[in-house]
Image (cartoon, rainbow, N blue to C red):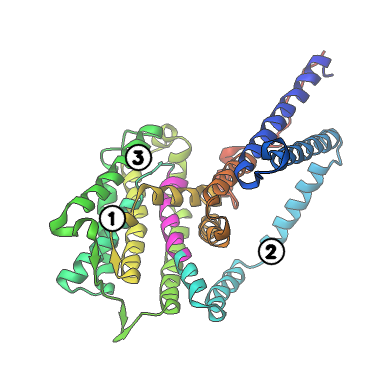
C-alpha cells in the first residue's frame, strides 16, 4: 500500500504544475485583457483567467484520481471508445476517404472569392514545403533549420532562367527540383557526423548563407531589388493567371507530393529513415548505410522545396531575398511538429492550421504571435505527438497510461 508521504508527494507534484500553469496563462492573457481603469491596475481579468485555469486543473486532477483506481474508470472507458472508433474507421476503405477528400478539395474553391482562394493556394504551397521537411525531420530525425534555402533555390532558378534564358515553367520545374536536391546533398555531406543542436546550427548557417548570397550578388540576383517580370505558366498556349487556376495547379502538385511521400514512408527507405531516427547506432548495426540514408533524406526533402519555390516565383512574378528568411523555416518546422512528425495527414492539417488561423485572427494583429506561441506551448505539453500522430512516432514516445509502480509498506 502507498505510504502517507508517498500520497502527499503524488498530490503535491500535479498541484504545483496546476499553479504554475494558471500563473503562466494569466501572464499570457495580460496584454490581451488589461483595462487601464479597472481595479488592481487592470489585472482583474488576467486573475480571473488564472483562477479559471486552476479550477479546471483541480477538477481534472480530482476526476483522474477517482477514475484511476477503478477498473471501469473514465480513462479506461475513453480508451475503449477510442479503440472502437479506430476499428470503425479502419473498416472504411481508405480509397473512399481519399476520393471524398479530393472531391472536397476540388469543389470547395468554386464557391469562394479571390481572397479565400489565394489563402487556399498559400496553404497548398506550405503543405508541399511541410511534407518535404517532414522527410528530413519527421522520418529521418534530422533537425533542419535552414530548409527555406532550398525554397529560395527553386524560386531563383525559375526567376533567372525565365527572365534571362526564356525557359518555361514546365521546363524549369524539374530543373529547380533537381537543383534544390543537389544543394540538399551538398548540405548533407558536411553534417553526416552531426546530430541534435550541432546539426541545427549548421543548417541554420547554411540557410543564412544562401539568403545573404542572394541579397549581395547584385550582378546575378539583383540583390535586394529582386527579380521582376517572371513568366506565368502556360498550358497548350493558355496562360495561367487567375487565383482559381493557380489553386488547381498547386492542388496537382500537392497530390503528387502526398503520393510520393506516402510511398516513401511505406517503402524500405522509409523504414530505414525511421530506424535511423530512433537509434542510428542500432540502425547501422543492422546494416543500414547511414551516409546514403541521410543524403537521400536531405536530397528528397529539398526536392519538394525547390518545386514549391518554382511555383511561388511563377505565381508572384517577383521574388526577393526578404521572402526567404529564417522565420519561414521556423513556421514550416512548426507545421510539421504541430501536425505530427512522420504523419502525412497530420502535416497537411498542421500546415492548413498555421496558414488559415492567422488570417482568421487578423483583428488581433498585435497579439497573433503571442497567441500562436502560447498555443504551441500548450500543444507540446498536452499532445507532444501532434494533432494526428504517426503510429511509429506513438510507439517511440511510449504509452502515457502505463501503470507506475507504487511503494509497498
Query: Which disc is residue 290 wearing?
Result: 3
Q: Position of residue 219 (x, y in %)?
A: 12, 58
Relative to 146, residue 153 above or below = below
Q: Element at badge 2?
A: helix
Toward the viewer: 112 or 238?
Answer: 112
Residue denoted by label 2: 91
Residue denoted by label 1: 321
Which quadrant holds the C terminus? Answer: top right
Which quadrant holds the N terminus? Answer: top right
Q: Residue at x 47, y 44 (%)?
A: 274
Question: Which residues are the magenta region?
Answer: 123-140
3D distance between C-alphas at marks 3 and 1: 34 Å
Toward the viewer: 296 or 91?
Answer: 296
3D distance between C-alphas at marks 2 and 1: 49 Å
Q: Position of residue 218 (x, y in %)?
A: 16, 56
3D distance between C-alphas at marks 3 and 2: 38 Å
Toward the viewer: 52 or 107?
Answer: 52
Rate crowding at label 1 as few (under 14), some (14 to 19) or many (20 or more) other CA atoms within 10 Å.
many
Q: Position of residue 70 (x, y in %)?
A: 87, 36
Amino acid at each position: 500500500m502507498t505510504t502517507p508521504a508517498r500520497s502527499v508527494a503524488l498530490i503535491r507534484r500535479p498541484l504545483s504544475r496546476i499553479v504554475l500553469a494558471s500563473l503562466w496563462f494569466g501572464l499570457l492573457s495580460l496584454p490581451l485583457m488589461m483595462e487601464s481603469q479597472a481595479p488592481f491596475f487592470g489585472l482583474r481579468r488576467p486573475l480571473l483567467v488564472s483562477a479559471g485555469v486552476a479550477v479546471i486543473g483541480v477538477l481534472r486532477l480530482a476526476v483522474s484520481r477517482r477514475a484511476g483506481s477503478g477498473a471501469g474508470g473514465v480513462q479506461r472507458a475513453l480508451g475503449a471508445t477510442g479503440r472502437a472508433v479506430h476499428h470503425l474507421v479502419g473498416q472504411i476503405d481508405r480509397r473512399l476517404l481519399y476520393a471524398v477528400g479530393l472531391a472536397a478539395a476540388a469543389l470547395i474553391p468554386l464557391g469562394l472569392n479571390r481572397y479565400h482562394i489565394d489563402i487556399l493556394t498559400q496553404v497548398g504551397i506550405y503543405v508541399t514545403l511541410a511534407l518535404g521537411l517532414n522527410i528530413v525531420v519527421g522520418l529521418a530525425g534530422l533537425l533542419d533549420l535552414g530548409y527555406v534555402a532550398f525554397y529560395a533555390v527553386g524560386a531563383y532558378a525559375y526567376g533567372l532562367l525565365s527572365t534571362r534564358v526564356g525557359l518555361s515553367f514546365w521546363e524549369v520545374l524539374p530543373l529547380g527540383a533537381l537543383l534544390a536536391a543537389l544543394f540538399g546533398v551538398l548540405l548533407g555531406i558536411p553534417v553526416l557526423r552531426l546530430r541534435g543542436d550541432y546539426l541545427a546550427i549548421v543548417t541554420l548557417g547554411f540557410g543564412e548563407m544562401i539568403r545573404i548570397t542572394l541579397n549581395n550578388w547584385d550582378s546575378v540576383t539583383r540583390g535586394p531589388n529582386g527579380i521582376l517580370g517572371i513568366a506565368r505558366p502556360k498550358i497548350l498556349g493558355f496562360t495561367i493567371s487567375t487565383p482559381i487556376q493557380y489553386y488547381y495547379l498547386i492542388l496537382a502538385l500537392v497530390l503528387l507530393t502526398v503520393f510520393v511521400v506516402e510511398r516513401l514512408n511505406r517503402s524500405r527507405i522509409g523504414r530505414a529513415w525511421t530506424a535511423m531516427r530512433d537509434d542510428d547506432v542500432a540502425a547501422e548495426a543492422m546494416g543500414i548505410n547511414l551516409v546514403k540514408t541521410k543524403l537521400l533524406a536531405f536530397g528528397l526533402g529539398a526536392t519538394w522545396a525547390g518545386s514549391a519555390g518554382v511555383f511561388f516565383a511563377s505565381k508572384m512574378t517577383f521574388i526577393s531575398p526578404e521572402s526567404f528568411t529564417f522565420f519561414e523555416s521556423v513556421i514550416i518546422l512548426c507545421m510539421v511538429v504541430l501536425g505530427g512528425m512522420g504523419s502525412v495527414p497530420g502535416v497537411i492539417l498542421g500546415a492548413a492550421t498555421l496558414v488559415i488561423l492567422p488570417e482568421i485572427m487578423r483583428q488581433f494583429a498585435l497579439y497573433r504571435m503571442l497567441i500562436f506561441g502560447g498555443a504551441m506551448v500548450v500543444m507540446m505539453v498536452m499532445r507532444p505527438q501532434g494533432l494526428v500522430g504517426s503510429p511509429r512516432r506513438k510507439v517511440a514516445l511510449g504509452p502515457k497510461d502505463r501503470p507506475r509502480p507504487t511503494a509497498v509498506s
